[in-house]
Amino acid sequence: MDIVEWSRWESETVRGRAKGEIGMDATNDRAAWFQGGEAVCSVTPEARSRAFRLVLLGPPGVGKGTQAELLCKSLGTCHLSTGDVFRAASCQHDPSPALRSALDAMRRGELVSDGLVVTMVEERSGCLGCCGGFLLDGFPRTVSQAEALDDLLVRQGVSLDAVLSYELPLPEIVDRLSGRRTCSKCKAVYHVTARPPHKEGICDLCAGSLIQREDDRPESIRVRMQAYEESTRPLADYYERSGRLVAVTADGAPEDILERSLRELQARATLARH
Ligand code: AP5
């Protein structure tokens, strides 16, 4: 996007934010992503002059899901989380053996196999070509998944705008993970001290009960951090080499990190112009 387009987008976004018009439609069930196959989302995305296609990278608990929610509201795009798809599938009465082994891996804090994850995203690749854009959270997580994503994007005729890579010291990450509470119905994310709900244990948005994720137990957190260091951190180099990496510090309030992310995206657009 050149700077003229950027300015137009930015002023529309700021105006829209002030009027509450821009943002991922909260009534959209994202069925195409959650169910895959022929499923169609309850709200058809608006074709936009500027659709953002982004990946969020960073260790477990750094705040990717929280930023995804805020970025989607600001940019009017759609949050696609592979972890959310697996967690939604865990409610199936009779999961396939492959899904059962994926859910076991998740509980232990290990990564699900590349083959299964890539097949799952491939079955939903229409979401990558969606005219509303996308914000991928939790995928890719290995270099092999990143290569598969590049292939899928080529087949959809679209390309990534940027990979936002969030970093935070380990003690703060552990604090964020151990205090996280998630709505059992709408999946909204809270934190017992940093982002508490108005009523303890109850979701502000849908009154669902708030639960602690199984993989937020200390023993699973350790395994997840190790999987991140071994398999996911090398992705930063992969995206740096192709000029798509945008590093963002993830300390401070979520809204401050959002502003930092938007500023970095803008700086990148300005640089691309010159
Ligand atoms: P996934 O669901 O992707 O989880 P994750 O990457 O481990 O990330 P999290 O959701 O734990 O953290 P987050 O960074 O989104 O932080 P959040 O915003 O919630 O994956 C889960 C599992 O699924 C994996 O372990 C794996 O088994 C499997 N899987 C999924 N995709 C896979 C793939 N592609 N390949 C292989 N396996 C795959 O924030 C955390 C807490 O901090 C919250 O309480 C929040 O309120 C709080 N918080 C956020 N921001 C701030 C802030 N600025 N200040 C204070 N508190 C904050």
Image (cartoon, grey):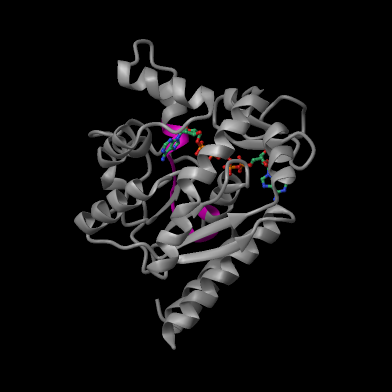
Q: Residue at x 76, y 36 (%)?
A: 196
Relative to 21, residue 243 above or below = below
Q: Quadrant of residue 255?
A: bottom right
Q: Residue at x 66, y 59 (%)?
A: 257
| Magenta range | 72-85
Q: In this view, does 145 lie to the left or right of 174?
A: left
Is residue 63 shown to the viewer in this render? yes
Q: Residue at x 38, y 20 (%)?
A: 101
Q: In which quarter of the image is residue 242?
A: bottom left
Q: Which residue lies furthest to the left in this view?
A: 155
**Which quadrant of the rendered structure holds the C terminus?**
bottom left
Relative to 257, residue 221 above or below = above
Is residue 83 covered in magenta? yes
Residue 104: percent from the left, percent from the top? 45, 20
Is residue 206 shown to the viewer in this render? no
Q: Is residue 149 left or right of residue 196?
A: left
